[in-house]
Amino acid sequence: MTVFEYGNPNAGIVLVQPVDDHDMSVMDSEVRYIRELTDQEFGLIAVKVRNWNNDLSPWVAPAAFGNEGFGNGAADTLAEMMKLIKDPCKTIIIGGYSLAGLFALWAASRTDLFCGVAAASPSVWFPGFIDYMADHSVHAGTVYLSLGDKEEKTRNPVMSKVGECIREGYSCLQRKGIDCTLEWNRGNHFKEPDLRTAKAFAWVMERTGNRGVRV
């Protein structure tokens, strides 16, 4: 993996985000949006993964579109990512878009390192993930979820379940007493990922602040 850093490296808030080439093309605008949405100082660590479908998947699953299935590389990615956190006493928020959002939710169930999760349009349609959320607690105290209002309106039988899944996931977090929200954005999955991700991070930053507190 390759690491890119943005913002203030000395800030008390550290944002961690798995990214691919598409994310990297809009990172500057994402950072700008975050700064417009919150006055909190932050540093952002963008971790570019090598194989999106493998490196961010918690377990093996068949292809949802095209021919490329999903691997089980999330555990290795999380282990490498945790090595990048130089000061675990800072307020550390993990987040991302699409499969990276799903990875962020999963990662927060595996460690108490993260104070918050910023999951923008997460791929919660991923086979077995909502059952996993029901059976495993998110250790972060604050979770943001979002989805585009057209994302569930697709002919793909797997991905069309995303609306039902995110509503169920949100309810699951509420039942477990997590400080959470579910925001609906306009458009399909590919509309304004930089702004959606920025909104996710900014909301969590405003809720957690520079406290360095983990649940």
Image (cartoon, rainbow, N blue to C red):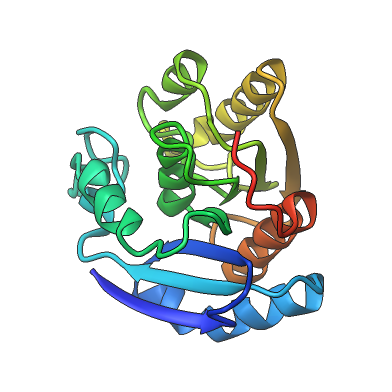
Q: Position of residue 174 (x, y in %)?
A: 72, 22
Q: Nearer the viewer, residue 152 or 25?
A: 25
Using residue 111 as the reference point, say whether residue 28 is left or right of it: right
Left or right side of 108 for 173: right
Quadrant in the picture for residue 182: top right
Question: Whole-percent x and y of residue 90?
Answer: 57, 59
Q: Position of residue 204 (x, y in %)?
A: 70, 52
Res. 197 image quadrant: bottom right
Asked if residue 210 is positioned above or below residue 3 in the image, the reply reads above
- Position of 88 relative to 143 (above/below): below
- Which residue does the image show at 38% across and 33% down from the upper left? 110
Q: Quadrant of the C terminus?
A: top right
Any part of residue 66 in sight: no
Let me know if residue 212 appears in the view.
yes
Q: Residue drawn at (68%, 21%), measured in percent from left and top? A: 171
In this figure, what is the number of numbered marks?
0
> Observer-nearest residue: 174 or 207?
207
